[in-house]
Image (spheres, rainbow, N blue to C red):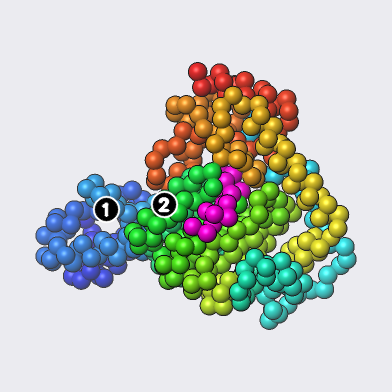
Amino acid sequence: MNGIGGRTAEEIAGSVRDLVSVGELAAGAMLPPIRTLAADLGVNRNTVAAAYRHLVAAGVAETHGRGGTAIAGQPELAREGAPVSSLVDLSSGNPDPALLPELRLPTAQDPVLYGVTPEDPRLVDWAERTLAADVARAFTVVVAHGAVDAVERVLAAHLTRGDAVAVEDPCFLAHIGTLRLSGFEAMPVPVDAEGMTAAGLERALAAGVRAVVVTPRAQNPTGASLTAARAAALRAVLARFPHVLVIEDDHFSALAQAAYHRVTPPETARWALVRSVTKFLGPDLRVAVLAADGVTAAHVRARLAPAWVSHLLQRLAGHLLEDEPTSALVARARTAYAERAQLLVDALDLPVAIPPDGLNVWVDVPGDADRVTAALAELGFHVRPASAFAVGGPTRHALRVTTATLTPRQAEAFARALDTATK
């Protein structure tokens, strides 16, 4: 006997959870076949099948198709950044530290106690002024611990485990991790030189996704930005699905070369536009503002309470966003990042199909990108292959090359190494 007991689906699922809690069923352990467990317990097979569905929905188990059902483990998630090594780091996705401002408030701050308004008024005022023209409808501002936190909280406010979410393919690493940890199904939508494709989004919506996460510009990893025409096409598709949650992650807003083109149509009931400060003020300044409809904003704010975003961080962000020297530094960074990306594009013999905007260049390569990545490491360069960002669409033969700190000499050396690695 396997130790699993119960007569109803709820009792059987509870028994399995008890065995997991005390360590008798470890991650990866296969649960008995439905027919076998039903016979052991003297219950209908549909009862065991329902119990297994409960366990999968709760994230306790995972299905392997014909391979059966197994106890789920903690997924291993890739993160931005690169290990310390002797290789030239062109993989981390980090901004250039030399182009980030000093994180220091000009004066001492009074202590903030429990019961205060969670958002700093100065930061909210900045957000309302800067977002009003882009949103062009009523909205509420909420402050979150960065863009990834904001996206996760908005999804959690409206979705349940097992719901499908349309995301770009290839996709931002953090979004892949958020969906996996939250138990959402990632539905891949292809990306081309103009961003998320309208035909791909149409297919995902027809398949029943409950939410869409889209990057309007400087999409990570490809660097693609939506054109006005593509954004209009996406709005037209989404307008026919007003119940679907739409999240726009405009993470590179202050540094992007491309203009912002809104994806969310007026018909969408639940939506959020997220803008983080981490790319231009520093990854450690965990602050993002989101404009959202009133219901979504209330849900996100409730999920933050009582652990609000530190008012020290909010005040620092608000100060820097209106500081003239910082604005000048951000403008210099915007130009520098565009020039460094172009250094690589000009040095390569291979064509770059997606004009880059952001900290990375997406380089299509002939053959297996994982093999090319390994060969480049042997030649002294660390990059990331397309497989790291794959959601489930067709295999891409490409590399993401971070150019935030790229020098002309490194660009030429990398181009020579890539030529060698692809032969």
- Location of residue 262 with respect to 27 vertically, above or below: below
Q: Position of residue 107 (x, y in %)?
A: 88, 66
Q: Nearer the viewer, residue 319 or 84?
A: 319
Query: Which residues are drawn in magenta?
Result: 218-233
* Residue 73 at least partly seen: yes
Q: Is the residue 146 above or below the residue 96 in the image? A: below
Camera-nearest residue between 6 and 100:
100
Q: On the picture, is 213 further left or further right than 340?
A: left
Name which of mark 1 and mark 2 comes first in the sequence: 1
> In the displayed image of the protein, which residue is found farthest to the bottom?
115
Q: Tell me the distance, in whole angstroms, between the alpha carbons under discs 1 and 2.
A: 31 Å
Residue at image location 50% in from the left, 44% down from the top: 192
Q: Is residue 15 left or right of residue 158?
A: left
Dominant SS of magenta comes to loop
Q: Give the image location of residue 57, x and y in percent.
A: 34, 63
- Tell me the number on the disc at residue 316: none
* Residue 157 sits inside the magenta stretch: no
**In which quarter of the view is residue 46 placed?**
bottom left
SS for dot 2 = helix
Q: Amino acid at mark 1?
A: Thr
Residue occupied by mark 2 = 200
**Left or right for 153, reference 2:** right
Q: Residue at x 83, y 70 (%)?
A: 109
Which residue is situated farthest in the right direction here? 107
Q: Amino acid at mark 2?
A: Gly
